[in-house]
Image (cartoon, helix red, strand yellow):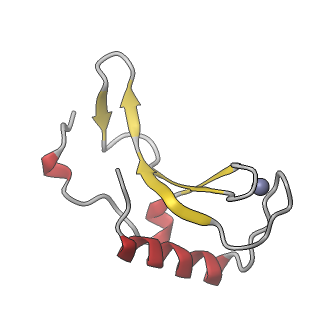
């Protein structure tokens, strides 16, 4: 699920407030992390290829712009939750 620019701003503000400057655990890069490809992921049932919105822990994925290392955060802790759930297959 793509993330809106408004939500990206929320993520950036949350990261700055809670984590300060984040240094990449892999390469040590510490400039701005790339939120262009950031997405909210949820559980995918590999048997039915249906998304389970109510199961598991959703994740906000951000990527180091230098080496590609990925960090995941729980959006519920950030105060972010999925929207427009009714538009998707819910199981
Ligand atoms: Zn890196």
Of 42 and 56, the residue lying toward us = 42
Q: Is residue 54 above or below residue 49?
A: below
Question: Residue at position x 75%, y 77% from top?
Answer: 21
Horizontal arrangement in the rendering, residue 90 relative to residue 21 (left or right): left
Corner quadrant of residue 43: top left
Q: Nearer the viewer, residue 21 or 78?
A: 21
* Up/down of 79 relative to 82, above or below: below
Q: On screen, 28 above or below 43? A: below
Q: Quadrant of ligand 1?
A: bottom right
Single out the residue that lies furthest toward the top. Answer: 47
Tell me: 42 left or right of 53.
right
Percent position (x, y) of residue 78?
49, 70
Residue 75 x %, y %: 46, 62
Q: Residue at x 45, y 77 (%)?
A: 10
Q: Residue at x 74, y 73 (%)?
A: 31
Residue lying furthest left: 86
Extreme residue toward the front, this view: 66
Q: How many marks?
A: 0
Q: Position of residue 48 (x, y in %)?
A: 29, 19
Q: Position of residue 14 (x, y in %)?
A: 55, 78
> Quick check: 88 above or below 9?
above
Looking at the figure, which quarter contains the C terminus?
top left
């Amino acid at each position: 699920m793509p993330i809106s620019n408004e939500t990206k701003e929320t993520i950036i503000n949350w990261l700055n407030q809670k984590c300060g400057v984040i240094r990449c655990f892999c390469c040590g890069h510490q400039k701005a992390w790339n939120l262009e490809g950031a997405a909210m992921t949820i559980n995918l049932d590999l048997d039915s290829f249906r998304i389970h919105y109510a199961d598991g822990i959703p994740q906000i994925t951000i990527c180091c712009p230098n080496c590609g290392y990925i960090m995941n955060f729980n959006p519920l802790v950030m105060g972010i939750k999925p929207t427009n759930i009714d538009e998707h297959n819910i199981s």
